[in-house]
Image (cartoon, rainbow, N blue to C red):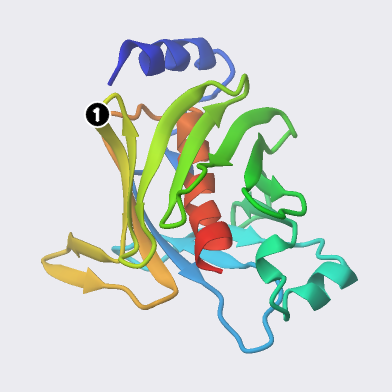
């Protein structure tokens, strides 16, 4: 891992409490979208891919009536969203939000206390999928690159892979090919536990689904 990210971790250590049971400290996540014909809100479960245990909830709890109605139209991609990532007991860990988007998306990420963590800026002319992952000062932290048609994305920092999103995962002695609405996030060991970029990566994975796929 580069010195920049290592330095960020040292600086953030005084604010983050390292907890071996922190669900964000694991490296493997199975993300399952709630599907339904009349589904307006964006809801996901994040599970342990080995056991199927739900470790995080992703919900859109405050969906306005106008936004709800527009979600059933061709303007769905332009609608705002505010997704809460919580523990199964309801503790808010991360919020992922965007206002009305007419062209390129700018997504903001805050922690459970409402403190800014950073965000994402969609790249111009990157229809296939591409975001700059930014810290709270709008400095690039890493790049999200890939193609939504193959649903294979990588988070890259100075040529190093920090995380990988895929529908194909080799684990527990067999290959898993997920369905159209499910995928696996694997975070590299290069990313230290409790590093704030973990929250940004998880938020970015939801952003792929909300902005590029919908």
Comparing 31 with 75, the one in front is: 75
Position above or below: 178 against 77 = below
Q: Where is residue 110 in the image (x, y as percent from the top left)?
A: 67, 36
Comparing 57 with 100, the one in front is: 100
Helix, strand or loop at mark 1: loop
Position above or below: 34 against 62 = below
The residue sitting at 37% across, 15% down in the picture is 6
How many numbered discs? 1
Comparing 176 with 158, the one in front is: 158
Which residue is farthest front? Answer: 125
Q: Is residue 118 left or right of residue 170?
A: right
Which residue is farthest left? Answer: 173
Comparing 27 with 155, the one in front is: 155
The residue sitting at 66% across, 39% down in the picture is 108
- Number of residues whose C-alpha sits closer than 10 Å to that of mark 1, classed few (under 14), some (14–19) or many (20 or more): few
Q: Is residue 97 left or right of residue 6?
A: right
Image quadrant where residue 90 sits: bottom right
Instruction: State the quadrant of the N terminus.
Output: top left
The residue sitting at 62% across, 48% down in the picture is 104
Q: Position of residue 20 (x, y in %)?
A: 41, 35
Instruction: State the quadrant of the C terminus.
Output: bottom right
The answer to whether residue 35 is seen in the rendering is yes
Q: Mark 1 points at which residue?
A: 159
Position above or below: 32 against 104 = below
Q: In this view, does 18 lie to the left or right of 30?
A: right
The answer to whether residue 93 is seen in the rendering is no
Q: Is residue 176 left or right of residue 131?
A: left
Q: Position of residue 201 (x, y in %)?
A: 46, 41
Q: Position of residue 78 (x, y in %)?
A: 71, 61
The residue sitting at 71% across, 76% down in the picture is 40
């Amino acid at each position: 891992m580069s010195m920049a990210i290592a330095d960020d971790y040292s600086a953030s250590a005084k604010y983050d409490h390292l907890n071996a049971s922190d669900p964000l400290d694991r490296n493997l996540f199975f993300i399952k979208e709630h599907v339904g014909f009349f589904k307006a809100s964006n809801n996901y479960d994040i599970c342990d891919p080995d056991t199927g245990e739900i470790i995080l909830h992703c919900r859109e709890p405050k969906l306005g009536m106008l936004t709800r109605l527009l979600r059933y139209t061709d303007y769905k991609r332009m609608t705002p969203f505010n997704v809460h990532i919580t523990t199964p007991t309801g503790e808010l860990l991360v919020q992922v939000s965007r206002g009305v988007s007419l062209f390129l998306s700018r997504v903001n990420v805050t922690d459970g206390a409402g403190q800014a963590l950073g965000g994402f800026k969609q790249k111009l002319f990157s229809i296939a999928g591409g975001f700059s992952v930014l810290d709270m000062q709008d400095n690039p932290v890493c790049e999200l690159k890939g193609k939504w048609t193959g649903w294979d994305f990588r988070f890259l920092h100075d040529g190093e892979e920090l995380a990988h999103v895929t529908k194909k995962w080799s684990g527990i002695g067999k290959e898993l090919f997920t369905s159209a609405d499910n995928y696996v996030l694997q975070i590299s060991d290069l990313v230290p536990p409790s590093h704030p970029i973990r929250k940004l990566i998880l938020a970015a994975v939801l952003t792929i689904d909300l902005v590029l796929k919908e």
